[in-house]
Image: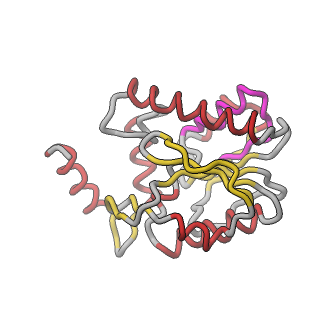
Amino acid sequence: MDAARQRRLQAETLKYAARGDYNAMAFWADRFLEYGFTYRAVGDRGKSEAANAKDYTSALALVADFITDQLDLATHARIVDLGVGTGAHLRMLHALGYHNLVGVDITPTFRCELTAALGNGFSFRQADIGTDVCMPAHTDVILLTDVLQHLVHPAKFRFCLERNVHEALYGGGVVIFTERFENVAYSYYEVMREIDVYHSLLAPTDILMQATPYRDKFITAWRL
């Protein structure tokens, strides 16, 4: 990490971190306002917008191929993106004809942009996925891409997987999520966890996609 990024991280730690957690609402509201409706808002701030766009292009194609080809998901299926951010995955799915889309985020910064891009088949919910039960009924697929590592407090991480994923999908639903599958705390707002932690909390009945490289992480899909 270069000196400038180190100084920024130190300043942010003082501003947002608190007792083994961080003020996620303030952090993401500030970050979204700084970068706007761009890939850098949710991607790698150390890279250019063009570099982030390139990373996301291949990542989005991977998810699109899985959902349309391997999962063969009907276009009326309900897909919920937890930690929707700028909605890159939902916008991709909308372009493919999916029209029952829900985005959940801790800040409403991009609500208007997402609603304009996704039309009448989209609904937005503001919620903290680590403390609020926020899932609509009859969910078929949950997306959790570049999100779970930001649930740094163990209780919030557990709450999200148990209440907003396992309870919502138990009986056949599918969760698509990203992780590095290592026990490492990278910063005050980013903690990675081993795959055994996910198995214990989600108890998948089938692994539909083995861990596959996705940007700087791996992506996998489990049926619960």
- Say whether residue 178 is left or right of residue 69: left
Is 9 above or below relative to 36?
below
- Say whether residue 155 is left or right of residue 21: right
Here the colouring is: secondary structure
Residue 69 position by quadrant: top right
Does 90 appear in magenta?
A: yes
In-front residue for pair 88/198: 198
Residue, x 49% and y 54% (percent of image)?
179
- Residue 87 in percent (x, y) is at 59, 38
Q: How many numbered discs, if any?
A: 0
- Residue 7 in percent (x, y) is at 17, 50
Res 144 seen here: no
Is 211 above or below relative to 188?
above
- Residue 205 in percent (x, y) is at 74, 64
Q: Quadrant of the C terminus?
A: bottom right
Does 59 appear in magenta?
A: no
Q: Which region of the structure is painted magenta?
A: 86-103
Residue, x 45% and y 54% (percent of image)?
180
Residue 201 position by quadrant: bottom right
Is 60 above or below relative to 204?
above
- Say whether residue 42 is left or right of residue 136: left
Residue, x 32% and y 59% (percent of image)?
186
- Say whether residue 164 is left or right of residue 188: right
- Residue 187 in percent (x, y) is at 31, 60
Res 57 seen here: yes
Is 99 above or below relative to 16?
above
In-front residue for pair 192/36: 192
Residue 3 position by quadrant: top left
